[in-house]
Image (spheres, grey):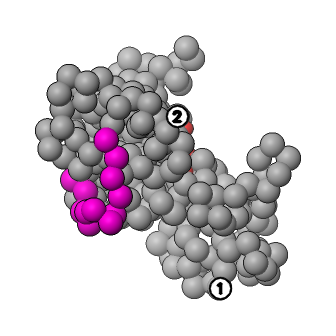
Amino acid sequence: MSEMDNAKKLVGEEAVKYIEDGMKVGLGSGSTVYWMIKKLGEYVEQGLDVTGVPTSQTTAQWAKEFGIPLTDFSELKQLDVTIDGADEVDENLHLIKGGGGALLREKIVASAAKELIIIVDRSKKVAHLGAFPLPVEVIPFGWEVTANNISTLGCVPKLRQKDGEVFISDNGNYILDCPFDKIPNPKTLHKELKSLVGVVETGLFVGMTDKVIVGEGDEVEVISKG
Ligand SMILES: O=C(CO)[C@H](O)[C@H](O)COP(=O)(O)O
């Protein structure tokens, strides 16, 4: 296993320590979250009583595979904690998410939780957001117009493809990857993007994170919202 994968496993397993008996848990998406779900499955097998709300179809599959009971927002309106990965985390704990294309459901699930815990390997910690192209979920109809409008904010959006096809999100939308290079004010950019017709959601998670668990080598650092 690579050093990075080892760090993802480490923080994924560490995060499970924050899940208590009886909790309703938002289950994020991505390869780091995979390790959290796998470990949580072991705890459930030993008798831990938890219910999860998944942020993607892939996560729902993993949860089923590891025996974690699932529910949805028709059954509950609030979660105790959401545990998710990220593509970038800055010093203010603002995030870029959506590398896996699940940003909309991730944001809904994060916003429903009393606490949002982010798990990342060290490579995701940055001084300024923006080196990772910002994922923006858009309505397929007229995406070219939406992309053109987004470009006036200072990037050249690229329509996401997967295996030679246009990538379709779990919500039936497209993702535009927007290389802003540096995002000095994530809150302002998020607002500007959201004001454009056709934009459904952005991968900027501003002021939502309570805790970040960072893994490097065999070390774990926990950073709490200050
Ligand atoms: O936002 C996400 C998916 O939409 C993921 O949390 C993010 O891409 C991190 O993934 P990984 O843990 O595989 O590096």
Majority secondary structure of magenta residues: loop
Report, in whole angstroms, how far the alpha carbon at label 1 lies from the one at label 2: 32 Å
Callout 1 environment at 10 Å: few (<14), some (14 to 19), or many (20+)? Answer: some
Question: Mark 2: which secondary structure?
Answer: helix
User: Looking at the image, is 120 positioned above or below residue 189?
Assistant: above
Q: Which residue is mark 1?
A: 197
Residue located at (43% from left, 24% from top): 9
From the viewer's side, name the closer residue of 89 and 54. Answer: 54
The answer to if 18 sits in the magenta stretch is: no
Q: Is residue 12 left or right of residue 127?
A: left
Give coordinates of residue 211: x percent, y percent: 29, 47
Q: Residue at x 45, y 57 (%)?
A: 106
Residue at 20%, 22% (x, y): give it: 46
Q: Identity of the amino acid at label 2?
A: Ser
Residue 77 visible to the viewer = yes
The reply to whether the C-beta atoms of the residues labelled 1 and 2 are less than 8 Å apart is: no
Q: Which residue in the rendered view is the most extreme toward the top?
A: 1
Q: Quadrant of the N terminus?
A: top right
Q: Is residue 209 above or below residue 213?
A: below
Residue denoted by label 2: 31
| Amino acid at circle 1 | Val
Q: Residue at x 57, y 85 (%)?
A: 195
Tag 1's secondary structure?
Answer: loop
Q: From the top left corner, tell me how far across and down residue 48 is, in percent.
A: 18, 32
In the displayed structure image, the side of residue 174 where residue 73 appears, left or right:
left
Beta carbon at label 2 within 8 Å of ligand 1: yes
| For marks 1 and 2 on the same chain, the one whose residue lies earlier in the sequence | 2
| Left or right of 24 on screen, residue 87 | right
Q: Which residues lie in the magenta part?
A: 69-80
Q: Seen from this angle, which residue lies furthest left?
A: 21
